[in-house]
Amino acid sequence: MTRDQPESPLTLSSSTAGTKERLIAAALSLFQAKGYHGVSISDILDATSLPKGSLYHHFPGGKEELAIAAVTFIADEVDTKLAAEFSKNKRAGAVLLELAHECVLWLRRTDFTQTPLLGLLAASPGESALTQAICTAQKRWLSRFEMALGGTEDAHDKACLALASLEGGISLARMARSSDLLIRSVTLAALHINQRS
Amino acid sequence: MTRDQPESPLTLSSSTAGTKERLIAAALSLFQAKGYHGVSISDILDATSLPKGSLYHHFPGGKEELAIAAVTFIADEVDTKLAAEFSKNKRAGAVLLELAHECVLWLRRTDFTQTPLLGLLAASPGESALTQAICTAQKRWLSRFEMALGGTEDAHDKACLALASLEGGISLARMARSSDLLIRSVTLAALHINQRS
DNA sequence: TTGACTATGGACCGACCGGTCTAGCCTCGA
DNA sequence: TCGAGGCTAGACCGGTCGGTCCATAGTCAA
């Protein structure tokens, strides 16, 4: 399981031969399935068939540093995706729907075992750097929507609704094992967001 | 911490003197703060100053059985709250706002360390009975809204949006440590839900 | 060929995990 | 007065946790 490389480039530094990236990819998918505390170091090692030494060589900070790398990775990926979609001057609602559609594919592909964004990672140690990283990611995504919606007060509200309906919809859908719930909530939200008002 | 008894009755069987309820209350608040895997049995024991024997006497199934009891407890409480609000023939949007308002108070009271509903518990063991319990709770809440909205196809959509914006908003707000985000997304969602259309 | 450096492999550690088990306490009916 | 049984108390268990450490292998410049 989780043997597939992340499709994104990720520098791929010559000598490292992708070990670091494999660790990040495996860690991310495990964290998204079981949350930070639900995944052990040896789970990640098993998934990558790598020894402990490699992990602590690339991530001296251990589990938390690896988790932060994973969060940063997905944060960047989604952020890039958002930037690309918005640059096609799509309306915010359309971008939201597009993102939701990808999440649906993701959920189905993993048989609803994984949570596409960062929802589950929220169960992270209190004031840790990991929590900070998650927080930063959400802020970036939020401000992408906010900018695209004009940067007004109203835009901020709509951006909140967009992200909330997405994260919440994912959670509902995952539990019910039916992407339907995600589609429904996001579609309605997108409708509202696109209204001039 | 978490010394307060749950305000709800909860049978309170004579001889048990509330031990079971104390365990449930402590477990719930800990799980809501750190997720299922983030809480250890001894965390719960410490919070209640109870010995291990008591826990395994009341919950022979151990951690998972206790977690299920906690989920069932909050599920019932919210469900009752919803029933009460709807019976005052409020509009669904108003009920959603009321619920969100309570969540805001909750977040502030716990300094954003706890997640009011079930969000964090989603990081639970795969196909377990616990996951089932969470799933059931969400279905019940969903159908409360659905009924109140008329039971049509459109009502289902709106109910999804209501719950998604709530759960998602909580997650956003908790990370940003600002209840603002929750208010904003839920207010917009409520607006949309109240529209006839 | 050699030496310096990076990366892998995995034994090992103390702490803590969830769970079991039994000894005693306390209450209440007979 | 005296058991019986519900409940508390906590020592104890094997397993697993995150993390350390060092020996080895690979690689490249000199």
Image (cartoon, coloured by chain):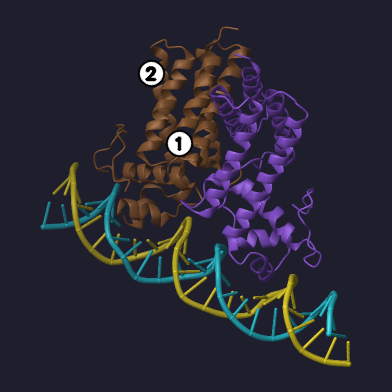
Chain colours: A brown, B purple, C cyan, D yellow
Q: Nearer the viewer, residue A152 or A68?
A: A152
Q: Nearer the viewer, residue B158 or A109?
A: B158
Q: Quadrant of residue C26?
A: bottom right
Residue at x 61% of width, y 34% of height:
B143
Callout 2: 10 Å neighbours few (<14), some, many (20+)? Answer: few
Residue at x 62% of width, y 22% of height:
B189
Query: Do the residues at discs 1 and 2 belong to one chain?
Result: yes
> Quadrant of the image for the C terminus of chain B?
top right
**Residue B11 in the image, given as x and y percentages of width and height:** 77, 56
Closer to the N terminus: mark 1 or mark 2? 2
**Residue B18 in the image, given as x and y percentages of width and height:** 78, 61
Residue at x 78% of width, y 62% of height:
B13
Q: CA distance from mark 1 to mark 2?
A: 28 Å
Whether residue A35 is visible here, answered yes or no, is: yes
Q: Amino acid at mark 1?
A: Ser
**Residue B151 in the image, given as x and y percentages of width and height:** 60, 27
Mark sitting on residue A84:
2
Whether residue B30 is visible here, answered yes or no, is: no
Q: Amino acid at mark 2?
A: Ala
Q: Is residue B72 above or below residue A151?
A: below
**Residue A64 in the image, given as x and y percentages of width and height:** 48, 47
Q: Quadrant of residue B173?
A: top right
Q: Chain of mark 2?
A: A
Q: Nearer the viewer, residue A193 or B87?
A: B87
Mark sitting on residue A178:
1
Residue A30 located left or right of residue B69: left
Residue B37 located left or right of residue B56: left
